[in-house]
Image (tube, rainbow, N blue to C red):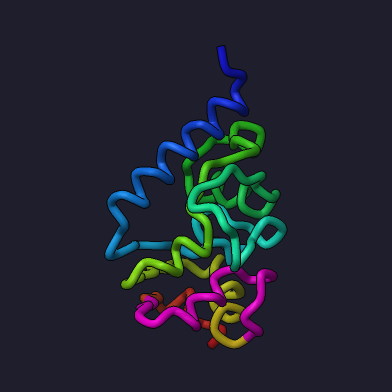
């Protein structure tokens, strides 16, 4: 019997194999309040990750966002870890569409578009994507 961590790693390997066999042509993304994409929070973000899918530890800003978005009732209800696509895999997908609503993400949008391309704001890597489109609302665009 596999422990939970081993089982999660096995699922990552299975998902990675499927993505290698059936590579995506298009990805729809969001941007987190801390600039994360697909749970690649600043502490765990790696633009050159050799993996396709991995387990990450969610930082407190990301976990609180899950409460703010209504996904969980309390901070303690939010899992501490998640399975995610890596940033290197996301960047390998030919077409990316990122939708970013709400005022809570205005700082992240500012940093992604006007700050350095750096893992401190993982979404900043989209500026180097050959075909990424960013959709903002009035509130999330309020700092640019």
Residue 135: x, y in percent?
36, 76
Residue 92: x, y in percent?
42, 68
| Residue at the spot 35% in from the left edge and 80% down from the top edge | 131
Left or right of 62 in this view: 69: left
| Residue at the spot 33% in from the left edge and 72% down from the top edge | 94
Residue 17: x, y in percent?
39, 44
Left or right of 24 in this view: 91: right
The one nearer the camera, 128 or 6, is 6
| Residue at the spot 56% in from the left edge and 65% down from the top edge | 104
| Residue at the spot 30% in from the left edge and 59% down from the top edge | 24
Residue pushed farthest top?
Answer: 1
Q: Quadrant of the N terminus?
A: top right
Left or right of 80 in this view: 134: left
- Range covered by the magenta-colored residues: 115-134
Q: Is residue 54 magenta?
A: no
Task: Judge whether 42 appears above or below 116 on screen.
Answer: above
Identify the image quadrant of residue 105: bottom right
Residue 6: x, y in percent?
59, 27
Left or right of 143 in this view: 96: left
Task: Judge whether 5 appears above or below 106 on screen.
Answer: above
Identify the image quadrant of residue 61: bottom right
Q: Say how many tags the image has.
A: 0
């Amino acid at each position: 019997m596999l422990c939970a961590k081993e089982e999660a790693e096995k699922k990552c390997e299975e998902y990675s194999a499927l993505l290698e066999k059936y590579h995506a042509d298009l990805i729809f993304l969001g941007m987190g309040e801390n600039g994360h994409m697909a749970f690649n929070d600043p502490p765990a973000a790696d633009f050159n990750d050799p993996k396709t899918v991995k387990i990450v530890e969610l930082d407190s800003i990301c976990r609180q966002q899950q409460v703010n978005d209504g996904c969980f009732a309390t901070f303690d209800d939010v899992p501490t870890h998640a399975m995610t696509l890596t940033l290197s895999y996301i960047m390998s997908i030919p077409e990316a569409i990122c939708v970013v609503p709400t005022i809570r993400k205005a700082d992240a949008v500012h940093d992604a578009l006007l700050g350095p391309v750096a893992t401190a704001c993982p979404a900043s890597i989209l500026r180097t994507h050959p075909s990424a489109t960013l959709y903002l609302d009035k509130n999330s665009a309020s700092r640019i």
